[in-house]
Amino acid sequence: HLSSLSALTHSFTPRRRLRSVPRTIYWSVFFLPYFIVFLVLFMGIVFPSYTHRPAHYNELRQLSRKSTLPGRANSRNEKVFIAASIYEKNGELTSGAWGKSVLDLVDLLGPANVYLSVYENDPDALTRKSLLKFKKGVTCNSSITIEDFDMSTLPRITLPSGETRIKRIAFLAEVRNRALAPIDKAGVQFDRILYINDVNFDPIEAAQLLFSTNVDSTGRANYGAACAVDFINPFKFYDRFATRDLDGFDMGIPFYPWFTSGGTATSRNDVLAGSDAVRVRSCWGGMTAFEAKWFQDQAPFDRDSSSTQTPSSSPNPNLNLAPLRFRYSEDIYWEASECCLVNGDLQYRRSGVGMPADSGIYMNPFIRVAYDTTTLSWLSFTRRPERLYSLIHNMLNPLVGFPHNNPRRTEEPGETIKETVWKFDDPVAAFKPDSTNEQRSGHAVEASRIVEPGGFCGGRFLLVMHETPEHGKGKWGKINLPGPPA
């Protein structure tokens, strides 16, 4: 009897265990979505990311909401120059949410404290009407510039093939500078500059970016530049081209926490800590506030103790040079965002070195903007559980090759660099898209260059404007530098 029972146990137990394996898999798959939903809700409610703002942020929001008095968000009456270089179709920006937000922001800051400069080139008929209507609603000193852009005013580069082209960044730097140009004749010593792209934003958050980011012991915001974070959809960070972490590395996969663990991982750790002043080498984020004195000639102004000019944290501020402006890289096959280069120039002016330990450039993840109103409306919800993404983000970055290697990342401005470059025997043939090893034949030559600030911004390629249909579709193009024969 016992032997029979033992045989039965031996026969049936493994089969029962085998049946339990698919059952376990089934229930695991069945409950996985519920577990994920629970985890998202739990993190979003109990440990929300960038939701509970510091007290001074809430105080500014309360001041902004409890009355309609112009300037209610600007208790120190700081002078702010707002600049925007935009391009729109059918006036959708100036007649829509963007235009309303800008006018509301002027009211929050106080019309007497603000100069608004909007620049738009080559507008269509409806946009012209919209801009003129928008201008009538502006309550502060302003310059609304509408013009047909003359492309012949831009510098041209000559490719090794002999063809001449216009760099895309040369154009973008120029139109940004044209929006900034009225600061030279405004007759006001500004404390802050706020540069706004074609983004949808909360006017109160714009005021918080200006006056609440990285406040010092006196309650005054202290920065060279402070940037919002821009989103192309409720989860995806947009402006990777202009953003570099404190080590000078480019971004990771474009979702939270955005930065990689490369180098010291300072920027990533600041994000994970929930800082409102994430230390970076460069950022833009669709909306950036600057310390104004670096962009304005200070000689005409009497610097006395009553001035409200924000003090610089730089030990040796150099205000005797020409005011900062946006620029492009003059190297033919080296491109960098004009918004990154201006940050490189700014910290070099403030510190005297290319990569100071304290860059004075901060990204503020409490302040978020978007390129459509639907995305903007979702950002207060999608940010809450984003701490969950950090582990998978850290795992995926090295798998896709982030951060990229940049040979100029740590170069110091003023240095003379000698490097080996490949000179093609037949540049015209070498630069054809389908060039062969034989067509790319040539020889190595020594070349030298003097380092400029912002080497961490760039990469070895060329961005151009399409001036004719033969150049390609759309307004912009990218030309990669062909390498030597394999």
Image: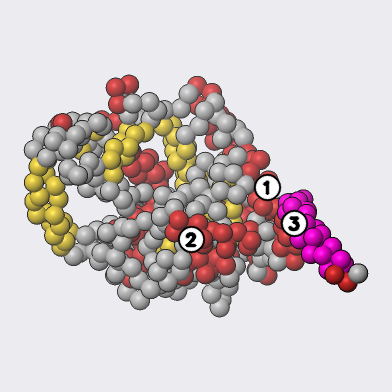
Three-letter code, disc 2: Phe
Q: Which residues are magenta?
A: 4-31
Mark 1 vs mark 3: in front: 3
Q: Which residue is mark 1?
A: 378
Quarter of the image where the C terminus is located = top left
* 465 and 436: which is toward the camera: 436
Locate residue 170, reporting x and y percent. 30, 41
Q: Residue at x 21, y 33 (%)?
A: 435
Instruction: Using residue 93 as the reference point, say whether residue 450 is left or right of it.
Output: left
Q: Residues within 10 Å of mark 2 (few under 14, many from 20)?
A: many
Q: CA distance from mark 1 to mark 3?
A: 46 Å
In the image, 480 versus 329, the foreground residue is 480
> Helix, strand or loop at disc 3?
helix
Give the secondary structure at mark 1. helix
Q: Does residue 282 appear in this view? A: no
What number is the disc on residue 18? 3
Mark 1 residue crowding within 10 angstroms, few (<14) / some (14–19) / many (20+): some
Q: Quadrant of residue 425?
A: top left
Report the residue at 33% width, 58% height from top: 405
Does residue 12 show up magenta in the picture? yes
Locate the N terminus and report the quarter of the image it occupies: bottom right
Query: Dot 3: few (<14), some (14–19), or many (≥20) neighbours within 10 Å?
Result: few
Dot 1 and dot 3 residues touching (CB under 8 Å): no
Asked whether residue 42 is drawn in magenta, I would say no
As measured in the structure, the alpha-carbon distance from the residue carrying label 3 to the one carrying label 2 is 45 Å
Q: In front of the other: label 3 or label 2?
A: 3
Q: Residue at x 68, y 70 (%)?
A: 55
Residue behind mark 2? 259
Task: Determine whether label 1 and label 2 are within 8 Å by CB.
Answer: no
Point out the tag, 1 or 3, that comes first from the N-terminus: 3
